[in-house]
């Protein structure tokens, strides 16, 4: 399901309802969706993050079979706990869209940028600059405070199974 305006969601629930006495479940879904749309944005809604809000690197596999020495395990982690942490954090991601990650050096800094891109629409989700002094500067959502999920409707995002479950929609 795509992220859609509340009014469209209400009309969709109305179309799916066959009887006037059948409005209890759709009404609950409407309330849940309205609450979902009003949630403040967090980085963990887009990418897996640890308990401190640090972006977790995607698991990298050297092969897809057990024929090689890696036995199908990720090569960029050292313990099963890290694998479990990544999968748990990935299950909490609520929105799927076109994310662009850029980790190129820039002048005297190392930068980590995560952008949300959909056609002509663009929003910087996360900026992390690490200076040569070791100082780290982080900025979320282009410095815009108080952004909510509903502010992202224009980006044509897809809700993950975790988001649908939170709303009460069976996957």
Image (cartoon, rainbow, N blue to C red):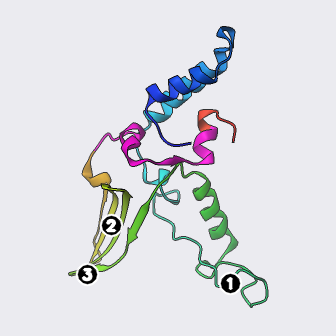
- Say what secondary structure mark 1 lies in: loop
When the figure is inspected, residue 10 is found, relative to residue 60, above or below; the finding is above
Specify the quadrant of the image occupied by residue 59.
bottom right
- Choose mark 3 or mark 1, whichever is in front: 1
Q: In the image, is 145 to the left or to the right of 40?
A: left
Q: Residues within 10 Å of mark 1 (few under 14, many from 20)?
A: some
Gap in Å between the C-alphas at discs 2 and 1? 31 Å
Residue farthest right in this picture: 67
- Say what secondary structure mark 2 lies in: strand
Q: Which residues are magenta?
A: 145-165
Q: Check residue 73 for magenta coloring.
A: no
Q: Residues within 10 Å of mark 3 (few under 14, many from 20)?
A: few
Provide residue 136's location: percent of width, then percent of height: 30, 69
Gap in Å between the C-alphas at discs 2 and 3? 13 Å
Q: Check residue 147 for magenta coloring.
A: yes
Name the residue tied to disc 1.
Answer: 63
Name the residue tied to disc 2.
Answer: 128
Q: In the image, is 145 to the left or to the right of 94?
A: left
- Residue at image position (52%, 56%) is 51
Provide residue 120's location: percent of width, then percent of height: 30, 55
- Residue at image position (68%, 9%) is 21
Name the residue tied to disc 3.
Answer: 132
- Choose mark 2 or mark 1, whichever is in front: 1
- Say what secondary structure mark 3 lies in: loop
Label 3–label 1 contact, CB within 8 A: no
When the figure is inspected, residue 129 is found, relative to residue 42, above or below; the finding is below
- Residue at image position (62%, 69%) is 82
């Amino acid at each position: 399901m795509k992220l859609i305006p509340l009014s469209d969601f209400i009309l969709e629930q109305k179309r799916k309802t066959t009887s006037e006495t059948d409005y209890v479940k759709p009404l609950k879904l409407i309330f849940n969706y309205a609450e979902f749309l009003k949630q403040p944005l967090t980085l963990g809604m887009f990418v897996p993050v640890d308990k401190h809000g640090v972006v977790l690197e995607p698991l990298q596999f050297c092969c897809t079979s057990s024929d090689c020495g890696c036995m199908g395990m990720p090569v960029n982690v050292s313990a099963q706990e890290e694998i479990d942490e990544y999968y748990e954090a990935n299950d909490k991601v609520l929105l799927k869209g076109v994310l662009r990650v850029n980790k190129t050096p820039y002048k005297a800094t190392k930068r980590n940028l995560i952008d949300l891109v959909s056609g002509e629409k663009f929003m910087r989700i996360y900026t992390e600059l690490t200076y040569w002094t070791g100082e780290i500067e982080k900025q979320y959502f282009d410095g815009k405070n108080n952004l909510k999920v509903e502010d992202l409707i224009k980006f044509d995002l897809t809700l993950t199974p975790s988001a649908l479950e939170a709303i009460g929609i069976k996957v």
